[in-house]
Amino acid sequence: MTTHPGRIGALGVCLALALGAACGDDGADDASSGDAAAGAGPAGTLDGTVTVFAAASLTDAFTEAGERFSEQHPDVTVEFNFAGSSALREQILAGAPADVFASASSSNMDEVVEAGEVEGEPTVVVHNSLEIAVPPGNPGDVEGLDAFGDESLLIGLCAEDVPCGQFGREALAVAGVTPVHDTDEPDVRSLLTKIEAGELDAGIVYHTDVLSTDGGVEGIEIPDEHNVVADYPLAALARAGEPEVAGAFVDFLLSSEGREILESYGFAPA
Amino acid sequence: MTRGRGARAADGAVGDRPPWGVVPLAALTLAFLIVPFAALLIRAPWSSLGGLLGRPIVTDALRLSLVSALAATALSLIGGVPLAWTLARTDFPGRSLVRGLVLLPMVLPPVVGGAALLFAFGRRGLVGGPVYDGTGFLLPFSLWGVIAANTFVALPFLVVTVEAGLRSADRRYEDAAATLGAGRWMILRRVTLPMVLPSIVAGAVLCWARALGEFGATVTFAGNLQGRTQTMPLAVFLALESDRDAAIALSLVLVAVSLAVLVPLRDRWLAA
């Protein structure tokens, strides 16, 4: 008998808690927009936080750029979220609190622009070219893209849906090679790991990835007439919490100092 | 066992009135578990579902998932039950350490587990290297690699469940069988295993469910190729990059298959 009102009461509590949680979320949003107003410090110096969503291949270069920027603006905190460009695009479109977006492909940036999330126009900050990565010592005697059609070798590519897989297939198509590959890796990092471990004889990655392994893999150049150049567009986002800080970080990356840092990691000037 | 049921029946009147706070907490917990699935259902592209599900990428992935999860469960049963028995019924130095090691794949991030498998059984691996040089046999990038990754990650669930069952089983039945002249194999086959059968089934179901959802170790160790090594979770992850509707449709298939297996089994074995 007493159990029935008890159960209804329990449901009531849940409902109240659920509503309370929703209200709590709204409050949090208000608080962050309040911060935005206080973005620029009283003396005109920058202070606040900039949250940068950047393609995984930019990890090392952007981390250094962020440190340099923070040295120049001690009151600014630069926070990074590095992931595959398409994953970042999804997060931004789902309302993640991003101030700056740097994508490893124009198509992902285009979708963010179309959704009205970009402040102004994106700028291509650097280029990256493709390279064949092989394990140290090149056990498969890979000499060029022709090896990707060799059934006796273990070959890896990035999956077709991620930029490095798309560009890699374009390069193979231009070279007239039909790949006979053994795995479509979900991102360039996992492809590199398998090549470094010697489990694959070759894969197509970015030039900067080969440099980042510090000798873990060897790079074999793809001739210019077959190579595909990837653009890295950069933009401040429309919903940036502190637009001045976001704009300043974008300007820094596009400055000669910023570009110099990026180029030191193997990126080609835009 | 019969003793347990009798006690529960006697407590029946008390059992109907839960202690204060338990039911609201249970309801909240349930909501936390169910709401994401409801959200998935709401976002599902129902009108185009039929077309999406007929694609070869879906049928290939579903077939590979079912085959590899089933094979991993079978291998776990063959190897896991003896391991559970040894841990529960024998005493040897370092047993608690071994018990901890068995749990390792449960806490290890699956991607790390996959890398460890690569270092052990890959072409240049500790064991895989000599095997490859001698026979040309290669686990990575094959269905056997998927099964190995699934087994590595899912096996502990079976071992832990069966070991707990063995420890709580009443050993007097085994002693009685021994005094009646039954041999060790006879006792294991006719007394011990039937006694812990619910634990074995529960462990096998957990193991199968874990194997079905396996992603990290599989993609790291076995790679990802449609029709060869691409299971449902891999297909879902990659579809998420390009085609969200397809990813949701694939997830729904995975959820439906799991429910179709788990609900009847739980009803029959765990709720009794």
Image (cartoon, rainbow, N blue to C red):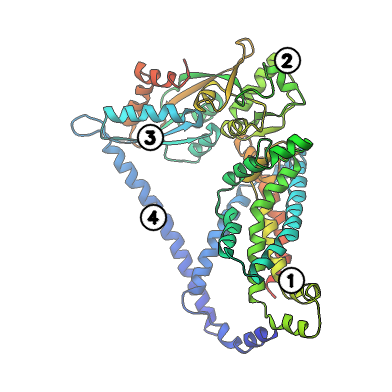
- Whether A263 is drawn above or below B258: the answer is above
Q: The numbered mark 4 sits on a residue in which chain?
A: A
Quarter of the image holding residue B228? Answer: top right
At horizontal 66% and vertical 55% (from top left) the residue drawn is B154
Q: The numbered mark 1 sits on a residue in which chain?
A: B
Q: Badge 4: how crowded within 10 Å, few (<14), some, or many (20+)?
A: few
Foreground label between 2 and 3: 2
Report the Cα–Cα distance between label 1 and label 2. Answer: 59 Å
Type of residue at label 2? Gly
Q: In this view, does B11 lie to the left or right of A212?
A: right
Residue furthest top as drawn: A225
The answer to whether marks 1 and 2 mark residues whose Cβ atoms lie closer than 8 Å is: no
Q: The numbered mark 2 sits on a residue in which chain?
A: A
Q: The numbered mark 3 sits on a residue in which chain?
A: A
Mark 4 and mark 3 on one chain: yes
Residue identified by numbered label 2: A176
From the top left corner, tell me how far across and down residue A177 is, in percent.
73, 18
Residue identified by numbered label 1: B197
Report the Cα–Cα distance between label 3 and label 1. Answer: 59 Å
Mark 3 and mark 1 on one chain: no
Type of residue at label 3? Ala
Q: Can residue B24 be seen in this view?
A: yes
Residue identified by numbered label 4: A24
Callout count: 4
Q: What element carries label 4?
A: helix
The answer to whether marks 4 and 3 mark residues whose Cβ atoms lie closer than 8 Å is: no
Type of residue at label 1? Leu
From the top left corner, tell me how far across and down residue B83 is, in percent.
68, 62
Quarter of the image holding residue B225? Answer: top right
Report the Cα–Cα distance between label 4 and label 3. Answer: 21 Å
